[in-house]
Image: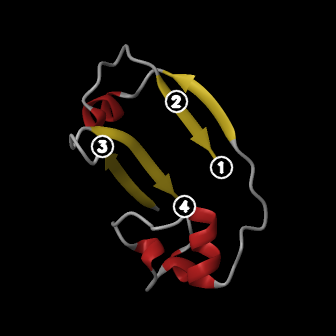
């Protein structure tokens, strides 16, 4: 699992929490396992660094209230609405 908090580059305000799940046997010793932001979209990076394109990709988007942990990480109210995208 790789979890990162992305910030606005001009203000350093947290704007996104990203979590990726990939077996360590695939991600180890590649930038996919590093904390730094990838220079390309995740699916392209997977293929680039491992030679394995995603077998299938489905996206689900919804809106919800943040968890207490997410609200604290993003410095927003727990009554705010966050967009969630799952692939």
Asked which secondary structure carries label 1, the reply is loop
Q: In screen coordinates, is 58 left or right of 40?
A: right
Q: How busy is the neighbourhood of tag 2: few (under 14 within 10 Å), some, or many (20 plus)? A: few
Q: Reply above or below: 13 against 49.
A: above
- Between the C-alphas of marks 1 and 2, the distance is 13 Å
- Label 1 or label 3, whichever lies nearer to me, is 3
Name the residue tied to disc 3: 8
* Image point (65%, 49%), residue name: 87
- Between the C-alphas of marks 1 and 3, the distance is 23 Å
Q: How busy is the neighbourhood of tag 1: few (under 14 within 10 Å), some, or many (20 plus)? A: few
Name the residue tied to disc 2: 83
Q: Which mark is residue 87?
A: 1
- Between the C-alphas of marks 1 and 4, the distance is 10 Å
Q: Reply above or below: 65 against 21.
A: above
The answer to which of 79 and 49 lies nearer the viewer is 49
- Between the C-alphas of marks 3 and 2, the distance is 17 Å
């Amino acid at each position: 699992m790789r979890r990162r908090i992305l910030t606005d580059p001009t203000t350093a305000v947290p704007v996104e929490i990203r979590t990726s799940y990939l077996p360590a046997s695939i991600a180890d010793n590649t930038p996919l396992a590093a904390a730094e932001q990838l220079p390309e979209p995740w699916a392209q990076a997977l293929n680039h660094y491992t030679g394995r394109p995603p077998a299938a990709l489905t996206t689900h988007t919804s809106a919800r209230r943040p968890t207490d942990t997410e609200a604290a990480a993003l410095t927003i109210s727990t009554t705010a609405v966050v967009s969630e995208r799952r692939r």
